[in-house]
């Protein structure tokens, strides 16, 4: 009996494959020649790699020796294991470092490994700076050579940094990157994500509107751009399992500024609260933090508008 699926249009095969689980795609690729190409494209386009799983290592071995399948990978997320405090398998780390340069179509790379050693940070940073692929999204540990990675990966739209201990902080590497981003047009937007409790989710987000611009280059609040859509799209694509990263899991926002001078607090907070309510419905706290002293804080002019919008938020929550 003739196989009627051979004559199906590629678009229809792709649509069918999009509804299949990964296990079904794997079976299709092995047993249904008419669907092999579409099944493999869907199967290898997004990969979650556990750096402690033998099955994940086998996937990397396949990609290492099959250049066609390696070119299909556009999204790669690397985690230590299902339990973050479980150390990474050295063989998995070797497999990652040797295979990563061959993923020439990679556009979204996320890596959260424990322990994140200096040697691993250097190896991965070297690969990213060599431009084997063109990234649009990067999420990684702050110990990476972030400044030079961003300089080399000129198509980056978003850089996310994982932090593990409570509130996000600005260490030297991040500060250097922020100062660089403030000096270049159309650079990537930077944010941090982390947690400070037993909640199995990355629920604290740090944002840097204006990239800590100096007062001399900060002309208007329009410079304080927050790429909400880019961030929410990145969170929607996240495949992490042991620590959830999702828009409805974010509970707390921290907004970092160079100073509060020239900031029209009333208008800015109104827009921020409106955008937060739209994109992060579970947020129950917003911190405004300045790196430099500000006359606005010393005169307490910032308090009335904050109190006004706090009352508005309370009214909104009460009306739900």
Image: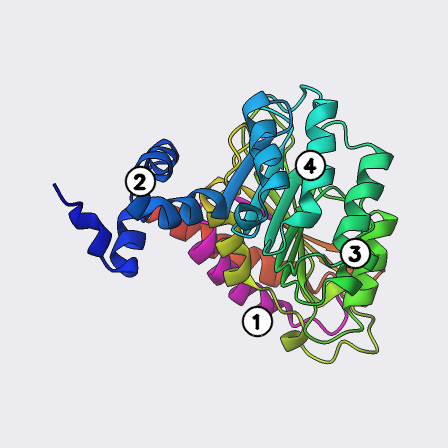
Instruction: Tell me which residue sits at (57%, 28%) in the image.
Output: 58
Q: Residues within 10 Å of mark 2 (few under 14, many from 20)?
A: some
Q: Position of residue 51 (x, y in %)?
A: 64, 28
Q: Can residue 238 be seen in this snapshot?
A: no
* Residue behind mark 3: 129
Q: Residues within 10 Å of mark 1 (few under 14, many from 20)?
A: few
Q: CA distance from mark 2 to mark 3?
A: 36 Å
Comes first in the chain, label 1 or label 4: 4
Highlighted range, magenta: 260-287
Q: Can residue 141 be seen in this snapshot?
A: yes
Q: CA distance from mark 3 to mark 4?
A: 16 Å
Point out the residue furthest to the front here: 1
* Residue behind mark 2: 20
**Element class at badge 4:** helix
Q: Which of the numbered marks, if any, corresponds to residue 96?
A: 4
**240 inside magenta stretch:** no
Q: Residues within 10 Å of mark 4 (few under 14, many from 20)?
A: many
Where, by quadrant of the figure, is residue 99 drawn?
Answer: top right
Q: CA distance from mark 2 to mark 1?
A: 47 Å
Q: Nearer the viewer, residue 317 or 200?
A: 200
* Residue behind mark 1: 267
Instruction: Tell me which residue sits at (73%, 39%) in the image.
Output: 98
Number of residue marks: 4
Comes first in the chain, label 1 or label 3: 3
Q: Position of residue 66 (x, y in %)?
A: 57, 43
């Amino acid at each position: 009996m003739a196989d009627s699926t051979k004559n199906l249009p590629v678009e229809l095969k792709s649509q069918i494959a999009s509804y299949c689980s990964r296990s079904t795609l794997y079976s299709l690729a092995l047993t249904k020649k008419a669907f092999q190409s579409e099944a493999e494209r869907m199967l290898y386009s997004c990969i979650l790699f556990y750096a402690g799983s033998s099955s994940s290592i086998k996937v990397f071995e396949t990609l290492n020796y099959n250049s066609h399948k390696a070119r299909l990978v556009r999204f790669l997320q690397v985690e230590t294991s299902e339990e973050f405090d479980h150390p990474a398998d050295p063989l998995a780390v070797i497999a990652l470092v040797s295979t990563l340069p061959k993923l020439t179509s990679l556009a979204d790379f996320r890596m959260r490994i424990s322990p994140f050693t200096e040697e691993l940070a250097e190896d991965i940073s070297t690969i990213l700076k060599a431009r084997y692929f063109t990234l649009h999204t990067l999420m990684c540990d702050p110990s990476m050579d972030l400044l030079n990675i961003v300089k080399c990966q000129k198509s980056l739209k978003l850089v996310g940094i994982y932090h593990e201990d409570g509130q996000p902080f600005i260490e030297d590497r991040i500060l250097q990157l922020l100062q660089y981003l403030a000096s270049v047009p159309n650079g990537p937007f930077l944010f941090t994500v982390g947690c400070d409790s037993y909640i199995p989710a990355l629920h604290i987000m740090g944002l840097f509107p204006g990239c800590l611009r100096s007062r001399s280059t900060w002309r208007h609040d329009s410079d304080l751009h927050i790429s909400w859509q880019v961030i929410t799209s990145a969170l929607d694509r996240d495949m992490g399992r042991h620590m959830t990263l999702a828009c409805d899991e974010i509970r707390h926002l921290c907004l970092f500024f160079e100073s509060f001078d020239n900031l029209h607090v009333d208008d800015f907070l109104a827009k921020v609260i409106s955008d937060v309510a739209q994109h992060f419905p579970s947020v129950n706290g917003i911190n405004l933090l300045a790196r430099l002293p500000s006359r606005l804080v010393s005169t307490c002019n910032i308090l009335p508008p904050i109190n006004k919008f706090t009352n508005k938020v309370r009214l909104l929550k009460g009306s739900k």
